[in-house]
Every structure is written in structure tokens, then in C-alpha cells.
Amino acid sequence: MDAQRPPVIVFFTDQQRSDTLGAHGCPLDLTPNLDRLARENTHLEHTFTCQPVCGPARASLQTGRYAHAVGCYRNGIPLPRDAKTLAHHFAAGGYRTAYIGKWHLAPDEQRGAVLPEDRGGYQSWLASNLLEFSSDAYQTRLWDGDGKPHDLPGYRADAITDAAIRYVHENKDQPFFLFISYIEPHHQNHRDDYPAPTGYEERYAGRYLPPDLAGGGGTAARHLPGYFGMVKRLDECLGRLLDALRSLGLDEKAVLLYTSDHGSHFKTRNGEYKRSAHEASIRVPGILAGGPFRRRGRLPEMASLVDFPPTLLEAAGLPVPPEMQGRSLMPLLDRKTEGWPKEAYLEISESQVGRAIRSARWKYAVRAPGLEGWKVGESSTYTEDLLYDLQADPWEQENLIGIEAFRGVADELKARLLARAREAGETFTILDAPVRPSGQRRTRVEEVG
């Protein structure tokens, strides 16, 4: 192994809420391996997706650019074939690159096998474009670089982990960049359920309901036991990968990122699982481990998926391309926080055309009335939609938008949102929400619309 170039691994889950971690207060002991990884390395306490939808979030994580800039503002829009991804940048730095699992960045007609030109530059390939449609909990089919299908035995997360461990073992003596993309804990689309490993769902039935889901209707009561079971198995898969790295002498050197594309609010905020600016939808796990990230503690700054590509490249000693819109997190390790954004910037699509920021205390979101989020990705005009004081109302039960007493706060946040939009390459205007009396509460039903 080249002493100057560490192996780099991304452990990427799908639809995982940040509060499934014990490190974020979950009382179910779902993630002992991940919690230990966070304690012993770098825990990004406030990590957010930049787009709470599968394809756009993945496009941003591959390129370090916001979804509107890449052009993948909704699912079903493939990653442009000339887009430069992490695979291209690591390969240029002498790394072997590999992708295993769910891709979701090729044209939808490529449901399983993905054409070479639609693989984002990855050299080694064992994946499915739409894994939620081409597989089931105990039926995992992935396609290799020649387009040949492989049926992998075992529970789906285990099967993908087995393939990842094989790759690590086969490439242990050379620098590699491995992206492992799980479908868990995403729902199984054709049945709309959360298929945990046999016996796991029963462990969590009726045990815990996150406070933001209480009283919100939706599917949480029915789906959380399976969802929690899937998270538990993911943590066990992480443990197996960490054990493999240790057995190969790579546990301290290998750089590992654990994160997810978005969370889930279980149909309590709109008619499906995500696609809103609420915490359950946008806040995800964020842990960086190994190499320069060992024993660096908990970082309180706002981090975004777009920040991870430049971070991984810098950690590997590779140049960060100027077109990347994210910022490397590396300076924060030494508490060099000057100029770091005070908020995360978000784009919302499909359920709406929206933009939002999330600061340490406030959530402020706007939407473009009358535009269909499946057909349009951006607008020249937005109207204020959400305002939450997360210090007083961490579960986002009372929307303060339009209340006269909070007009000053909304104006400040509007200016901050417009500034972040300009940095991201967007220009638009925001119309004030209609004024309502301070005592008039806007309910969650009204938010759903």
C-alpha cells in the first residue's frame, strides 16, 4: 500500500434518519458500531442532505455540486455523461475505483444493468441502477462491469457487504476508492414496507416513537419496527467491514465516511417519506473515520453532502477541483472556522419547488406556488413557507411563518437564504408570507396542503 495514499471508503445508506444513532439520542441501541466509530473519530453533529430525494442527493455527493447545477434536480434525470465525479478525481490521483450497490443515476430504462458510459467513471462495477425495484430483502441481483447479472446470497445488506469485503481484500496492497451504496433502510417500493432481516422487526415493535412523529398520522407506527431492524443490520454490516479492515491492518489508515442521502418522516409531513425541509427529511448521520479524522471529537458546524467530496479528496492528498461548490471540512478539525457557513443550504423538488436554510437555531423555507416539482427544478420567485425555532420547538410542531412578532427574524433569514443561493449560482426573489396574528397557529395539516 502506498504510504502516502490511504484507501478511501464511503458507507452510504438510503433514507436513514440521524436520530437512529445512539449518538443522537436513540434509546434502542441500534448502532453500537457506528456510535463507537463516532466517539473514536470525527462526529459531524449537524449533517444535512442538500436535496432530500435519492437521485439529486447522489448527484451532489458524486460531484460536490448542488443538484440544480448538475442538472439532476429530480429522480429519473441521469447524471450527465460528461460530469466529473469522485471516481474521475480519485482515478486521476492513482486510485483504483469501485462502486457496489444502488446507483440511481442512470436513465430509468436502465433499471438494473447500467451502461458503461452511465457509471460515473467507476472502473470496477457491481451494482443496480434502481436496486429497490430489481431486488428484495433476500433476493439481491447486481450487474458487473460486463453487464452480467449476479444473484448474491443472504440478506441484501449482508450480500453487498460481502462483496465490499471481497473487494477490500483483493485490493489491500494498492490505493483504492470504494463507494458502497445500500438500499437499507429505504422502503421496498412494490410493497411499501420496510423488510428487516427475519426476526428483527419483532425486536422493536411498539418500543419507541420519535417525538416529531407523534400525533402526525402517517405510517410510522406500522413501519418503524422494520425500519429500526434494517438500521440494526446496517450497523452489524459496518462492524463486519471494520473487522475486515482491522484484520488487514487498514483500520487506522483507511479513511471512511458514513452518511445517508436523506431521512424519512413516514408520511407525516406530506404524502410520502421525504421531499420536505423538515428535520426528519434532511438531517442525516455524518461520521468521518480513520487517517486524519481519528480522535478529533464532535464538530458542531453545519455540514452538507456537498462538503464531503472536497473533504475526501483533501484527506487523500488530492487536489480539489474549483467547480466543486462544497467546502472541505478538513480545516474544522483544527477549529479553523473562519468563513464557515452558519447554515446549510437546501433544494427541494418533486413535492414542490423549494429552497431552505437550516442554521443552529432556525429553519426557514420557501416554495414556488403553482409550480410542479416533477417538471421544474427552480424558480425566479418564491413565497415564504416555513419558519421554525428549533431551540424552542425541536420537533417542528408550530410553524411561525407570517406571525408579526417574527417578521424581523424572517427578514434576516431571508437575506441569508438569498446570499447562500447566490453562492450556489441561483438568483431569485422571495415574497413575504401573509401576515397572521401572533396567537394564530399554523398546523401541520395546513403545512401539508
Image (cartoon, grey):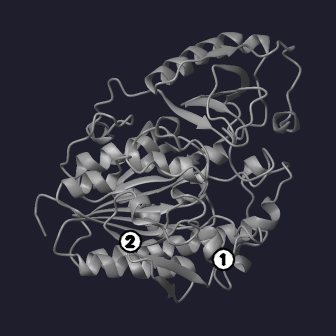
Q: Can residue 225 be seen? A: yes
Label 2 crowd (10 A; few <14 / some 14-19 / many >=20): many
- Tell whether 148 sits left or right of 210: left
Residue at 25% x, 41% y is 320
Describe the element under mark 1 as helix, strand or loop.
Answer: loop
Give the image quarter of residue 306: top left
Q: Sort mark 1 into few (<14), some (14-19) or many (20+) by Cα contacts within 10 Å.
A: many
**401 to the left or right of 297:** right
Q: Residue at left 47%, top 61%?
A: 12
Task: Out of 184 and 45, give the one closest to the viewer.
Answer: 184
Which amino acid, by three-letter code, is at mark 2?
A: Trp
Which kind of residue does numbered mark 1 sit on?
Answer: Ala
Q: How many marks?
A: 2
Which numbered dot is residue 196? Answer: 1
Q: Position of residue 72 (x, y in %)?
A: 54, 44
- Which of the two residues, 270 or 439, is positioned nearer the viewer here? 270
Residue drawn where x is 78% and y is 17% of the image? 402
In the picture of the structure, the residue carrying the numbered disc 2 is 125
3D distance between C-alphas at marks 1 and 2: 26 Å
Q: Residue at x 43, y 27 (%)?
A: 341
Q: Nearer the viewer, mark 1 or mark 2?
A: 2
Element at badge 2?
A: strand
Which quadrant of the figure contains the N terminus?
bottom left
Q: Does residue 247 appear anywhere in the picture?
A: no
Q: Which numbered disc covers residue 426?
A: none
Q: Earlier in the sequence, mark 1 or mark 2?
A: 2
